[in-house]
Amino acid sequence: MTSPPWSESPLIAAAGPLWPQATRSPFLDAAAAGTLPEEAFHRWLAQDYLFARGLTAYQAIALAKAPRDAHRTLIDGLVALDRELEWFESHAQRRGLSLAGPPHPVCRAYVDFLMRNAYTSPWPLLAAILFGVEASYLAAWSALTPAGPYAEFIERWSNAAFVSYVNRLAALATRYPHPEAQRVFDQVLIYEREFWQMAWEG
């Protein structure tokens, strides 16, 4: 039986207003319009790079806890994250932007949340968290038309390969339910909302 698409996940349906709050923002609107201030773009690029590094560590620990049928999806995700870090580094180098700066408190809190759960929570909660991270990002970027100066960025998180990956994460989150899954999923959305606000407002 084919799994339903990621967008039909009960975790999304139960998130209520947190879902649009986490997937829409003035930052994204400005990126789509090609009017994003360079300062905001650079802030997002540096902080999202630091977040991706934290997510890589989180996912590696999740892999160690995951059942065998989740390994391929998580390994594929780790490979994609490694390529993403290289992609961020190349963009930063071209722009003369340092990625060595300290994380913003919002980014630090988000990564701390990931790592705290990576070490203390069971696999089903880790699956719900990872699905929340990637599904909210897919929803945010795929709502935009890949055109203008940020078309490459929009395309990166809305292409068919990323959709397929998020569908696989949705299937894992559904296959391994947990009574606390909605709580951690909603917390991811709160951090996503705050991350967009930080990138836009500084």
Image (spheres, rainbow, N blue to C red):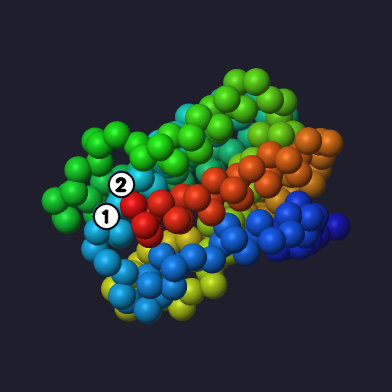
Q: Name the image quarter holding residue 1.
A: bottom right
Cβ–Cβ under 8 Å for marks 2 and 1: yes
User: Distance from label 2 to label 1 (Cα)?
Assistant: 6 Å
The x and y percentages for residue 116 are 57, 25
User: Relative to 167, is 202 on the left or the right?
Assistant: left
Q: Which residue is mark 1?
A: 42
Q: Amino acid at mark 1?
A: His
Q: Residue at x 64, y 43 (%)?
A: 187
Which of these two is toward me, 100 or 79?
100
Q: Position of residue 194 (x, y in %)?
A: 50, 50
Q: What amino acid is found at the position of numbered circle 2 in the picture?
A: Ala
Q: Residue at x 43, y 62 (%)?
A: 156
Point out which mark residue 46 bears.
2
**In front of the other: 146 or 136:** 136
Which residue sits furthest left?
96
- Tell me which corner region of the image, top left, top right, bottom left or bottom right, holds residue 151: bottom left
**Residue 50: x and y, percent?**
37, 39
Residue 164 as seen in the image, left or right of residue 176: left
Percent across and percent down for residue 117 are 62, 27
SS class, disc 2:
helix
Q: How many C-alpha atoms fall within 10 Å of the one at disc 1: few (<14), some, or many (≥20)?
A: some
Picture layout, residue 83 above or below residue 120: below
Work out whether residue 140 or residue 105 is closer to the camera in this orientation and state it: 105
| 23 relative to 125 in the view: left or right | left
Sort mark 2 into few (<14), some (14-19) or many (20+) by Cα contacts within 10 Å. many
| Number of residue marks | 2
Q: Nearer the viewer, residue 181 or 107?
A: 107
* Residue 56 seen in render: no
Task: Determine which of the numbered discs, if any, sits on residue 186 in the image.
Answer: none
Indicate the secondary structure of the residue bearing disc 1.
Answer: helix
Q: Residue at x 69, y 61 (%)?
A: 17
